[in-house]
Amino acid sequence: MGKKKTRFETEVIHSGYQPDEHQDSLVPPLYQTSTFTFGSAEQGEKRFAGQEEGFIYSRLGNPTVKILEDRIAVLEQGEAGLAFSSGMAAVSAVLVALTKSGDHILCSQGVYGCTFGLLELLKEKYAINHDFSLMDSMEAIEQEILPNTACIYIETPINPTMKLVDLEMVASVANKKGIPVVIDNTFCSPYLQTPLTLGCDVVIHSATKYICGHGDVIAGLVVGKKDFIRQVSRTTQKDIGGIISPFDAWLLLRGLKTLPVRLDRHCENALKLFNFMKRHPKIDKVYFPGDPEHPDYSIAAKQMKQPGGLISFTIKGTKETAQQFMDQLQLIKIAVSLGDAETLIQHPATMTHAVVPEEERRKMGITNTLLRLSVGLEAWEDIQEDLEQALEKI
Ligand SMILES: *Cc1c(COP(=O)(O)O)cnc(C)c1O
C-alpha cells in the first residue's frame, strides 16, 4: 500500500520521517555523532563497498540529516536532496560538480554577492568563464549559449532588485540543448516557487533564510535528480567537506514545520508595507514582484504562489541619506540575511554586494540609495510606524 499523497502544509511536518523507525519518537531525534559502529569487520567492509545500506561516518551521511534531505526533496518535488554547511557550500559544490576547466556558465543578470565572487574565482583559477544575461527572450538565450556552456545559473527574484526570470521559458531552451538549469530558490522557498516542476534541473537554497526562519542556523540545501545528487554527495560534498552538522539539520526540520504559516504572514506584511512605501514622497522607486506596475508582474503571477517577503526601494537623496535613514530605525534591525522573524534592512552597495565592482553593480541596478527590507513577522503597523518615523527625520 502506497503512502497517501498529502499537501505541502502536511509534508513540511511529516515527510521523510517515520516514528516507528526511531523508537517512536514524535520528533526526529538528533543523532549527534561523528561516526557509526560496525557489528563486525565484514559489515564495515560491506558498508564501504556499498553492498550493505547503513551509516558509516557523518561526513558521508547521518540519520538526522537524511530526514531533512528527504523532506526537502519532497517539498521541491525532486528525486533527492542533499544538505550543506551553508548556502555557499551548496552553490560551490553544485557548480564544481557541473563544470570543468574551459567551460562556460550563463548566469542571470544579478546574483548573490558571494556567488559572484565564486564565479570570479572559477574564472581566475580554472578558466571557467561566465556571462550575465537578462534572459528576457528565447532568442537571446539561444544566442548566449556557447558550445562550451555547461550550465545555466539563475536567481529569481534577483537579489536585490527583484527582477524576475521566466523559468519555464529558460528551461525550454536549455532542455532542447541538454544544458542543466540550476536555480537559487532562496528568496521563494519551495512554498512560493517549485522550479523543478517548471523544467529546471537543480534547486539550491540558502536554508539560512526562510527555511530556517529563525536566524539561528547557516546551512544550504540542494535538490535534483538521484544520479546528480549521488554524484555531488560522493565527490564535491564528500571530498570538499561542506556538510551540515546534525544539530543544524535538526533545527531546520523544526523551522520547516512552520514554513507555510510564516511565509503567509511575511507575504501579507510585505504587501501592506509595499502599499505604504509606494506612496511615500521620500521614497523614489519600490521593487516588489507584487506591484502590478512591476515589469515582470506577469511572470510573478505565473510562477510564484505569492510575491514574497522582500522589498527593495530607493530613498530620494544620496548614499548618506540612505544611511541616515537606516540609523534612525528603532524596531527594524540593520543586518544582512533575510527570512527571519525580525524585520531586517541592509544597504546592498556597501554590504551584500560590496564585492561586486561598481560597474557591474550599476548593470545589476544596485545604486547607492537602494535598500533591501526583509519583512519580518512583527505587527505590520509597528514596522510601518518605524519606517514612517525614520523617513520623517531625513
Ligand atoms: C544568503 C544567500 C546565499 C548564501 O547562503 P549562505 O547560507 O549565507 O552561505 C546564496 N544565495 C542567496 C540568494 C542568498 O540570499
Image: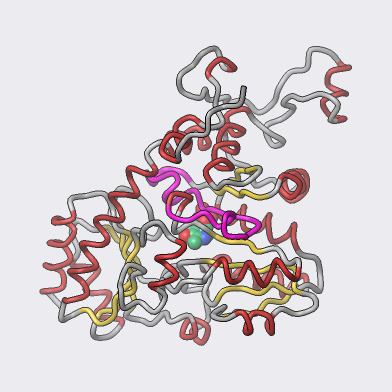
Residue 134 in percent (x, y) is at: 55, 80
Q: Residue placed at 86% from the left, 23% from the top?
A: 46
- Nearest to the observer: residue 87 or residue 152: 152
Q: What stretch is highlighted in magenta?
A: 192-217
Q: Which residue is drawn at 65% across and 47% down?
A: 242
Residue 366: % across, % down: 42, 79
Q: Which image quarter: residue 70? A: top right
- Viewer-proximal residue among 358 and 7: 7
Residue 234 location (% of width, % of height): 77, 44
Q: Is residue 153 above or below residue 49?
A: below
Specify the principal SS of the magenta part.
loop
**Scheme by which the image is coloured:** secondary structure
Instruction: Name the quarter where the N terminus is drawn.
Output: top right
Rendered position, 273 above or below 254: below
Residue 280 image point, x, y percent: 16, 76
Figure quadrant of residue 199: bottom right
Q: Is residue 129 left or right of residue 204?
A: right
